[in-house]
Amino acid sequence: NKDVWEYVNQFADFNNFINSPIARYKDKLYNLPFNMNTFYELWGTITPKEAQEKIEAQKKEFFASSGDGKTPRITNLEEQAISLVGKDIYEILIKGYTEKQWGRDCKDLPPSIIKRLPVRFTFDNNYFNDRYQGIPIEGYTALVQKLLEGIEVKCNVNFLDDRHGLGSLASKIVYTGCIDEFFEYQLGTLQYRSLRFKSENLDCPNYQGVAVVNYNEREIPYTRIIEHKHFVFGKQQNTVITHEYPQEWARGTEPYYPVNNEKNNELYEKYVELSKLHPSVIFGGRLGMYKYFDMDKVIEVAMNCWKAQQSE
Ligand code: UDP
C-alpha cells in the first residue's frame, strides 16, 4: 500500500529485505511460500502444469468422498490447505506446524488462517506479494521513537486501573488492548494464542543463513528460529537467534494472535455491539479489533480510521 509505505518512510529508512523463509522437516529443507521451488523439492515436478496436475489429483482424491468431488465446500483449515496445495504439502509443511502454532486440530481452525499464504506456480520465494517491502534500518524502536516525538508517553500504566482518570484526559481514546478485557469479560472470554521467546547470543557469525527457518514437524516444540542479523544484513562476528514456542493464552499472560474461529468471532461481534455504547473509544489493532492483521494492514486501518474521524 503506497500510502502506508510513504507514511512509515517519514519515520525511518527502510532496507530492501525480502522475507524468504525456509521450512525444515526431518532434515530436509523446502522453500516457502508454496511455489515451484517447493513443488520441485517435494515431487521433482519441473513445469507448472506438472505441479498443478499433482495438486489436482491429490485434491480430487481427498474430496472424492464428499459432495460431487468437483466443488468442495471448504469449512476448515484442513480442507482449505488440501484444496490449495494437495495432501503431501498439507501433511509435511502445514499440519504439524499449524497444530502446534494454534494448539488446535486443523479441522477446528478457520480456512482464513491459511489463505494468508500465497501459492504460486512460479519460481518465486518472496513470502509476500506486496510491492513495497523492507525493514527499518535502525530497527523498529527508532521508528516508534520518531513516531512519538513531541508526544507525552507514560509507560507501565494500565489504562484499566484508572479508566476514568486517564479517560478524562482526552475526548477520544484509542484502545489497543483486548476488547473483552476492556469490558471486564462480561460476555465471556475470547481466545488468544501466545508465544514464548528464547533468545541466545551465539559466538558464530552465521547460524542458519537466513532470517527465518520454520520447523514444521509436530514433535519439535518450537515453530521457528529467527536469526535477527539477516533482517538487516548484519556483519557482526556473533549472532542472536530466537526460538519461538507457541503456547495457550491465559488471563495475565501476553496475547499475540486472535483465534478467529466461528465461536470467538460471534462473541467478538457481541463486544462490538457493546462498544457502540462507548463512542469516545476507538478499538484498534489485533487485540482491539480481534483480527489477524499484519503490521502494514494495521497501519492502513489506523489511517482509514483517522480519515473517517476527520470527516465526522
Ligand atoms: N503455516 C504453515 N506452515 C508454514 C508456515 C505457515 O502451516 O511453514 C500456516 C500456519 O497455520 C500459520 C499460517 O500459515 O499459522 C500463517 O503463517 P504466517 O507465516 O503468516 O504466520 P505469522 O508470521 O503471522 O506467525
Image (cartoon, rainbow, N blue to C red):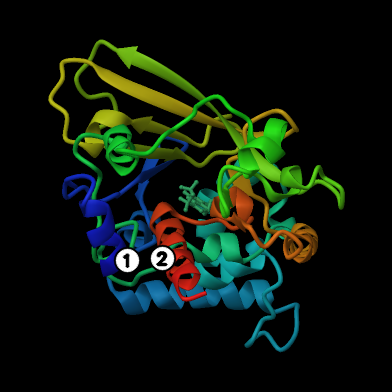
- What residue does disc 1 label? 129
Residue 100 visible in the picture? no
Write down the quadrant of residue 66 in the picture. bottom right
Q: Is residue 176 above or below residue 248?
A: below
Tell me the element at label 2: loop
Please give left or right for residue 224 compared with residue 275 in the image. Answer: left
Q: Which mark is residue 24?
A: none
Q: Residues within 10 Å of mark 2 (few under 14, many from 20)?
A: some
Badge 2 amino acid: Pro
Judge the density around disc 1: few (<14), some (14-19), many (≥20) Cα neighbours within 10 Å. few
Give above or below for 234 relative to 31. above
Residue 252, position as x, y percentages in the image: 71, 28
Task: Name which residue lies at 67% across and 52% down.
Answer: 259
Residues tagged 1 and 2 counted as in contact (Cβ below 8 A) = yes
Q: Is 23 on the left or on the right of 11, as rendered?
A: right
Quadrant where the image shows the N terminus: bottom left
